[in-house]
Image: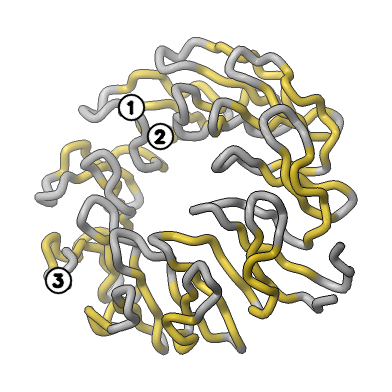
Amino acid sequence: MENGKYGFIDKTGKIVIKPQFDKAYFFSDGLARVEIRKKDGFIDKTGKIVIKPQFDFADFFSEGLAWVKIGKKYGLIDKTGEIIIKPQFDSAYSFREGLASVKIDGKWGCIDKTGKIVIKPQFDGASYFSEGLSYVVINKKWGYIDKTSKIVIKPQFDRVEPFSEGLAWVKIGKKDGFIDKTGEIIIKPQFDSAYSFREGLASVKIDGKWGCIDKTGKIVIKPQFESTVSFDEGLAAFRIDWKYGLIDKTGEIIIKPQFDLVFSFNEGLAPVSIDGKWGSIDKTGEMVIKPQFDSAPSFFEGLAPVCIGDVPLE
């Protein structure tokens, strides 16, 4: 019996790193962030602490580097735990496409992996680069820059998201639509809510119900569900009468609504909740890991962090 500690399981549900951490997160670049006594560090897949918990916050590794917070400032470490760029930034996003957005004195810019500022802090808001562009905020309007800091889509929207599959979600007034990389509106703002494209489809909300559109804006799964419908590995969770199931891209119900909650498929398994406990199903709906954990087992690089409370494990 363990008391509210985190460990890791493999895809059979076997505990491979015993519960011992106050918190634990997914593996990325072979390392997972763990928290012990309110300090963050990293372990490898054997459970060995390779970077001792010493940081006030640590982000996941991306492109070989991870942001850490010491006091009120953010810096970067490599996979040995060595500080590569000393803590000096007020906030930061993980490296994507070779650059990271950082905040200095209230303004956002970008650095490269040497810590050199390549886009000077000048924006009111920013995000990570995706498909060669990053969104920025100027005077409460949102647009996009390229890696030279050139504004390629002028700030004109009320909200945006990073580009995904060639299109970006944008908000104009109270309606959501999509633009291409020239800034042209491809799918006019008409939805009450929407999410970015994944696997060729985007979730949209019309009159309180969720469905999906394709990249032409055509509704391919009619709005009928109580929750978002975002696809991962060919399936998407949906909710009807407060129970969750899964549909395919034609809208056909593959796994009938029966779960209290379902998260996205990753590496062939999806976390599901029944009566407050979490397990995992495969794409046929078979329960591969029975509900027994206090947190959702999402698999990355073959392992999933789980919390085990006051329950005996079989």
Q: Secondary structure at mark 2?
A: strand
Q: Residue 179 bears which disc, if any? A: 1
x and y percentages locating residue 95 in the rendered image: 29, 59
Find the distance from the CA under tag 3 to the CA under tag 2.
33 Å
At label 3, the amino acid type is Thr
In the rendered view, does 274 fall on the left or right side of 307? Answer: right
Sooner in the amino-acid sequence: mark 2 or mark 1: 2
| Amino acid type shown at disc 2 | Val
**Quick one: 40 or 17, which is closer to the camera?**
17
> Does residue 48 lie above or below 136 as drawn?
below
Please, what secondary structure does the residue beneath circle 3 have?
loop
Q: Quadrant of the C terminus?
A: bottom right
Circle 3 residues within 10 Å: few <14, some 14–19, many ≥20: few
Q: Position of residue 168 (x, y in %)?
A: 36, 33
Mark 1 is surrounded, within 10 Å at the Cα level, by few (under 14), some (14 to 19) or many (20 or more) other residues, namely: many
- Tag 2–tag 1 contact (CB < 8 Å): yes
Q: Earlier in the sequence, mark 3 or mark 2?
A: 3
Marking on residue 140? none
Query: Is residue 208 in view?
Result: no
Query: Which residue type carries mark 1?
Result: Ile
Mark 3, residue position: 114
Vertical side of 169 occupied by 128: above or below:
below
